[in-house]
Image (cartoon, helix red, strand yellow):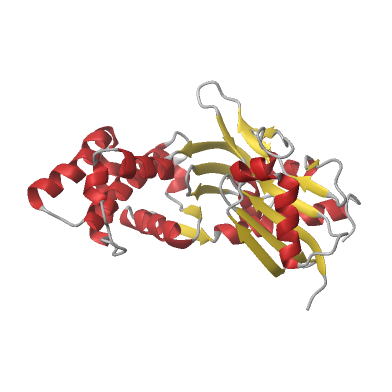
């Protein structure tokens, strides 16, 4: 087995992922949990981290690099933001040390868009961008999630980005509105055609979003249909709205015609691939976990190259 060199952590709002890495950026062991920022704030960030470090058997001297919500204002140590236009390389230069720890722990900053007409922030996704594109890449990037991000990157610089609350809206709409009746007891079957039709309808008429969502219930009452079909129509409508905005932003339309870099994984990644295919938009797919690990690996190598760490 390769010798362990450092520990990489992606610390989300509700999830925690840790990898024991060697010098080449290969994963030697991993540990996952639900102790995201919200839980860790109650348990203690140092306690949560140490429990997962113990789970992978990391030596006491190994340094740790962290991205995500541990660097938020409500997190462990605030890591601040790099303002757009933001060079991805500058993220590496602004890693914040966690004080009073027995090992060297660094938290990467996020990116802020300080535009009064479009204020926005990202934390964690900047590391995915770094892993997906490197420090000099160029792409229009879609990163699905609870809060999906679309980022325009040129020459390794994040020019602008936009956040869409697509995942959170799906959760609220399907659980807290009248549409909860339509999706009650839905099975695991996926109605692909219903999803694609909903994507196309929302993309073509985004101003009718509220009406399209209500049609999920009215159509079911008048014409029948399964709970799974209703769920797919809600999902397709919300994702279609996101794509209408993401692909229609000023300055991005020409680039979107050349394709999108989709950073996603699992079933959510499959849904977005299907949505883009429905609209005949080409995508280059990169697994989001791979992107996060690669970004953390780039950060670790930078810290070592600048004599901040010894790997």
- Residue closest to the eye, 35 or 9: 35
For this orientation, the residue located farthest to the bottom is: 1
Quarter location, residue 90 = top right
- Residue closest to the eye, 199 or 233: 233
Residue 160 in percent (x, y) is at 56, 35
For this orientation, the residue located farthest to the left is: 222
Residue 83 vs residue 308: left or right?
left
Residue 18 vs residue 304: left or right?
left
Quarter location, residue 180 = top left
Residue 173 vs residue 19: left or right?
left
* Vertical position of residue 102 compared to residue 26: above or below: above
Quarter location, residue 76 = top right
Residue 279 in percent (x, y) is at 32, 52
- Residue closest to the eye, 206 or 217: 217
Instruction: Locate the C terminus and report the quarter of the image it occupies.
Output: bottom right
Residue 299 in percent (x, y) is at 76, 52
At a point 45% along the width and 39% down the height, the residue shown is 164
At a point 24% along the width and 39% down the height, the residue shown is 178
* Vertical position of residue 191 compared to residue 108: above or below: below
Instruction: Locate the N terminus and report the quarter of the image it occupies.
Output: bottom right
For this orientation, the residue located farthest to the front is: 43
In this rendering, does residue 28 appear at all?
yes
Residue 128 in percent (x, y) is at 61, 51
For this orientation, the residue located farthest to the top is: 116
* Vertical position of residue 156 compared to residue 131: above or below: above
At a point 68% along the width and 59% down the height, the residue shown is 18
At a point 27% along the width and 61% down the height, the residue shown is 192
Residue 22 vs residue 132: left or right?
right
- Residue closest to the eye, 130 or 209: 209
């Amino acid at each position: 087995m390769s010798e362990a060199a450092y520990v990489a952590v992606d610390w989300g709002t509700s999830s925690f992922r840790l990898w024991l890495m060697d010098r080449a950026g290969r994963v030697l062991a991993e540990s996952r949990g639900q102790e995201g920022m919200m839980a860790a704030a109650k348990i203690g960030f140092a306690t949560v981290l140490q429990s997962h470090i113990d789970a992978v058997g990391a030596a006491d001297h190994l340094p740790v690099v962290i991205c995500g919500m541990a660097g938020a204002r409500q997190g462990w140590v605030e890591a601040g933001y790099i303002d757009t236009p933001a060079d991805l390389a500058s993220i590496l230069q602004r890693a914040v040390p966690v004080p009073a720890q027995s090992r060297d722990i660094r938290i990467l900053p996020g990116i802020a868009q300080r535009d009064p007409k479009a204020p926005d922030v990202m934390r964690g996704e900047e590391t995915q961008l770094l892993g997906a594109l490197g420090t000099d890449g160029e792409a229009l990037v879609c990163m699905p999630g609870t809060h999906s991000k679309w980022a325009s990157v040129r020459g390794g610089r994040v020019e602008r980005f936009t956040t869409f609350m697509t995942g959170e809206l799906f959760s609220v709409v399907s659980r807290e509105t009248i549409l909860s009746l339509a999706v009650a007891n839905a099975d695991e079957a996926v109605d692909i055609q219903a999803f694609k039709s909903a994507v196309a309808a929302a993309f073509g008429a985004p101003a009718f979003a509220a009406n399209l969502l209500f049609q999920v219930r009215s159509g079911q009452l008048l014409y029948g249909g399964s709970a799974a079909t209703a769920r797919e129509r809600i999902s397709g409508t919300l994702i279609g709205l996101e794509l209408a905005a993401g692909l229609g932003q000023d300055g991005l339309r020409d680039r979107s015609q050349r394709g999108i870099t989709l950073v996603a994984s699992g079933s959510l990644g499959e849904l977005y691939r299907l949505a883009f295919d429905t609209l005949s938009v080409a995508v280059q797919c990169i697994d989001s976990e791979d992107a996060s690990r690669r970004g953390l690996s780039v950060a670790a190598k930078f810290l070592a190259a600048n004599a901040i760490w010894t790997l």
